[in-house]
Image (tube, rainbow, N blue to C red):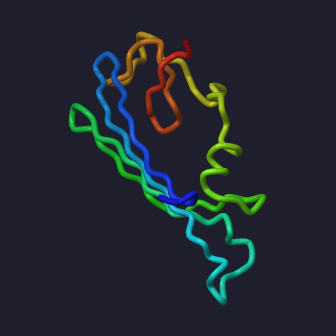
């Protein structure tokens, strides 16, 4: 492992929902390339996925371009990622509009993911 590589995982257990989550991210050192364009020091490749009950699964991969100071991926995750969830972009699920697998009172994200209420 290096400061420019992230591997993680976790689990989500809630009423009617069991998910295993995994992810990886790599920020290659492009400064060693002779013809590398300036400004690509924040380019990283990622893959995120989840597997759950009721045949739920997802995989997403792609490129991220972190802008700002030239720093390692571990510093970006520790210093630049928000520490608190912004619930302004989430809607509270009411009993009458509960999507399959999301318990009542949970937040639902714009992509349909379920988030438990803040404790």
- Horizontal side of residue 82 vs 13, given as left or right: right
Residue at the (34%, 46%) spot, across then down: 58
Residue 4 picture quarter: bottom right
Asked if 23 appears above or below 96 in the picture, the reply is below
Above or below, comparing residue 24 to residue 30 in the picture: above
Quadrant where the C terminus lies? top right
Q: Nearer the viewer, residue 36 or 109?
A: 36
Q: Nearer the viewer, residue 110 or 63?
A: 63
Residue 51: x and y in percent read 29, 40
- Left or right placement of residue 72 versus residue 51 in this view: right
The residue located at (45%, 34%) in the rendering is 112
Residue 34 in the image, given as x and y percentages of width and height:
66, 89
Which residue is at a point 66% across and 89% down the rendered structure image? 35
Which residue is farthest left?
54
Q: Is 88 situated above or below 78?
A: above
Q: Position of residue 1 (x, y in %)?
A: 47, 58
Task: In the rendered view, tell whether residue 89 sits above or below residue 76.
Answer: above
Q: Residue at x 44, y 58 (%)?
A: 61
């Amino acid at each position: 492992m290096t400061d420019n590589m992230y591997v993680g995982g976790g689990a989500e257990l809630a009423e009617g929902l069991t998910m295993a989550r995994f992810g990886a991210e790599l920020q290659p050192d492009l400064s060693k390339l002779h013809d590398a364009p300036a400004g690509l020091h924040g380019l990283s490749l990622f893959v995120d996925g989840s597997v759950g009950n009721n045949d739920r699964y997802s995989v997403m991969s792609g490129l991220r371009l972190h802008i700002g100071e030239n720093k390692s991926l571990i510093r970006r995750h520790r210093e630049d990622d928000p520490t608190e969830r912004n619930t302004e972009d989430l809607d509270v699920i009411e009993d009458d509009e509960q999507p399959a697998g999301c318990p009542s009172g949970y937040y639902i994200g714009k992509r349909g993911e379920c988030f438990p209420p803040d404790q």
